[in-house]
Structures are given as structure tokens and as C-alpha cells.
Image (cartoon, rainbow, N blue to C red):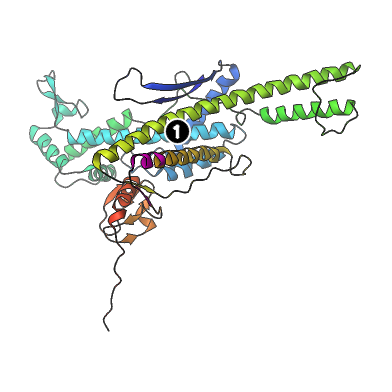
Amino acid sequence: MMGAGQVAYGKGQPKGTEKRMAELGRVSTSADLGRLRLLVLEACDRMADEVWPASITADIPPGKDLDAVMLATQAGLKGTLNSVWAEKARLIAKSAVQKQWKRARNNIFGRLRHIATVGDKPMPGGCRRLVNLPEEWSSRLTEAEIAHLQTFADSLDFPGAMAMFRKLAVGHVPCGLTTAQCEALAAMLGATQERYGKPTWQADEAVVQLHLDYRCLVGVRPALDSLLGRLKHEVNRLQGRPSDAAVDQELVGADDGRLVGLHRRFFKLLGVVGRLKLLRRQVYRVIDGLKRSWFGFVTTKLAQLCREHKAAYVRENLTILAEGKESPGNKGRTFNKVLNNGSKGQFLRRMSAKLKWYGIPEVVVPSFFTSSTDVRHSCVDGGQRRGEMFTARADGRKMHADVHAALTLALWPILRPRPALVIAA
């Protein structure tokens, strides 16, 4: 296993696009890591079982709803799997389920929209195979039935097709279709569900990334701190000094062999800790260089676009503060958010400086409700956003929430307050 950081960019040319690469080390596989891998794969299977639908035509729930179910399963792994690995398994399973579910729905819709497509070579009976239906249906359906199915399929959009398959599964016959046509559609759905089933992780071929830090291994950091503390306490006790006193690096006139051995062991261990901290600082410097290089590239591109189109740069007024090292919120997933927020703040400062250099106007817009405001109807309603989807309350218009927020920001400079209603006496 290995870890590395990389930023790649360019104009489509593969040569020279990898600008930074930081090698973070390798660990050989051991029996313990092998057992850990099996436990993580089993956890992935359990979590996928909890959320995989009975039918692929069911609407894919938002990520938060999937998390709510999978977190309950994750809690049940306590005592069996470290919380870090359990969370890793949840993230792996969630991503795999979402991708497979989406892939299956797209496949069945594509099959339906091209249900009359036939292969180039004729079958033994002389007719050409319907490539999107199980093979036996190529001879069971007449040309008229196939043409009617194609006309029916052309009349359905994606949501309508999924709703039709759900009704078909409970015995509802779509208007105008014969029993044979309904059975053909059911067979097509069955073939897709068989091909795109629940994601599974086979022990002999599945790949899982195991990122190691002190939280993942039982007792590593506490044991290290405890060992240094015990050595310090014992060295000071043998020298008749307070237990919390600093240990002198030079041991003068000591005849006690045990004291000499403990003193040497303490500074040897302290040297190991110092080297680890030095390596960590080196990695942080490399990561900082990666961010600076990437942010420089992105901000230059944005400034070029503004100059090319004679445009201003409009952004949200985001107040992003990095938490202190000792903050109680600076743990686990929150720590990842801290790093992300730090990167956002660094990007915003870099962007503002570059815009000033080129003389490009920067418009900072209040960030309140940008993704849940319908400027067309002067409607501010947090209920218009559900997960990643914005749905207008006035007319049902749907759009990705982030795209909608970007359009709201772009329109902000030309918006004006809604005039107050005047009620006649």
C-alpha cells in the first residue's frame, strides 16, 4: 500500500501534466492487515445490503438519507471494527451503491428507448435479434408489437419510464400494451437487474485503500505518550528530582546502570518522535506547495476568463475560520473540514489579490439562501432545496442546487428590492 498527493492539469496533453507528486511511504501487507481488509469488505457488504433497493427503478434517495441508514449499521460494528475503518467502509459502500444504482437506471432507460434496435446478423430462425431484450423475445414479438413498443417508449421521459416499470412490477398494465408486450418489458427489467445487482466485494479480488494514522491502530499514540511519561518519571525519581522536571540531555556522574539505561532509552525514543514530527512538517510543506501551485493555476484561468469576457467576478461572502489545534471540534471528520476550509480561505485570498492586480471588479454577495431563493418569483424558502436539488415552489422548475446558487449570484448585481404592496383604502 502507498499514499501520495498529486495535482495534474494541462491542455489535454498527457506529457508534463503531473506538476507535483509527494510520496508518503509504503507498508507491506501482513496477516493483521489481511484480516483488517476482510473485516472492512464484510462491513461494506453489510452496509450495501441495508440500502440496496428491491427494484432498481426506485428513486435514488439523497446522500443524507443513505447515511442515516448506513450509520446505524456502522454503529453496530462497534467492538468489531475500529470506528475509522467502519467509516471508511460506509463511504466505500455508499459510493458504490449510488454509482451502481444510477448505472442500472440509466441502462434500463436506454434499453427502453432503443427497444426496437436489432443486430446485424440474423438468428437461426431468420429474424434479427432485438439486442435490448432477452433473446427469446426476438421471435415471440411481431413487428407490429415491436413498433408499438418503440412508439410507447418514445412517449416516456426518464421519470415516466421509471414510474411505468414500478407500476408494471405490481401488475398494472400500461394503456394500450398487450400481455406479451408487458411480459417483454418485465423480462428486460429482470435482465438489467440481474446484470446490475447489489455491489459486492469478493475477498479474493476486491481492492480497498487502508489509510493509516494513529487513530486506526489500537493504543499507538497513547502508548507512545505513556511510555515517554513513564521514562521521564523514572529518570527524575532516580535523580531525586520532581517528576515533571525537564530531563537533562547530559547525565553527569551517574553510577546507576539502570538510570543510565533509562536515560539513554528516553532520548532515543524522543529522537524518534522528533524525526517523525520533522517528516510530518516536510509532508505539510509539500501539501502547501501543491495547494499554492493549483490555486495559482485556477485563479489565473479565472482572471483570464474575466478579462476575455470583460466580466466582474461575483462570489459569496464566506467567512471561513480555521479551528485551533486544541479545539474540541478539531477531530475526525471535522478535521477534514478544517483542512478544506483552510484551503477555501487561501483560495479566496489568492483570487482577490490577483483580481486587484488585473483591475477586475470583485463583487462579494451575501451568502444567505443563495441556493434556495427563486429570484424569478421573489421567493425565499429553504424548503425549495432538498439535498443537491433545487425545486421551485412556484412552477416546479428543477436544477442542481449549486448551479442555481451560481445563477443567483450572477444575477445579484442587477436585482432590486421587491416593491411594497400598496393596499387601497
Q: Nearer the viewer, residue 258 or 101?
A: 258
Q: Is residue 198 visible?
A: no
Q: Is residue 23 left or right of residue 160?
A: right
Magenta stretch encompasses residue 237: no
Left or right position of 58 against 74: left
- The residue at the far bottom in this view is 425
* Mark 1 neighbour density, 10 Å: few (under 14) some (14–19) many (20 or more): many
Q: Nearer the viewer, residue 201 or 226?
A: 226
Identify the residue at horizontal 28%, vertical 42% (top origin): 169
Q: Is residue 360 left or right of residue 142?
A: right
x then y, percent, for residue 184: 20, 34
Indicate the position of residue 187 as horizontal and vertical percent values. 24, 33
- The x and y percentages for residue 333 are 53, 39
Q: Residue at x 40, y 32 (%)?
A: 296
From the image, tell me which residue sits under label 1.
93
* Residue 281: x %, y % from top left: 58, 27
Quarter of the figure with the C terminus: bottom left
Q: Is residue 257 above or below residue 347?
A: above
Identity, as a three-letter code, of the amino acid under mark 1: Ala
Pick whichever, 155 or 392, lies toward us.
392
On whether residue 356 falls in the magenta region, the answer is: yes
Q: Is residue 127 visible?
A: yes
Residue displayed at 84% across by 25% down: 235
Task: Name which quarter of the figure residue 103 lies in.
Answer: top left
Disc 1 is placed on an element classified as helix
For the point 17% across and 33% down, the residue is 114
Which stretch did the figure color magenta? 353-364
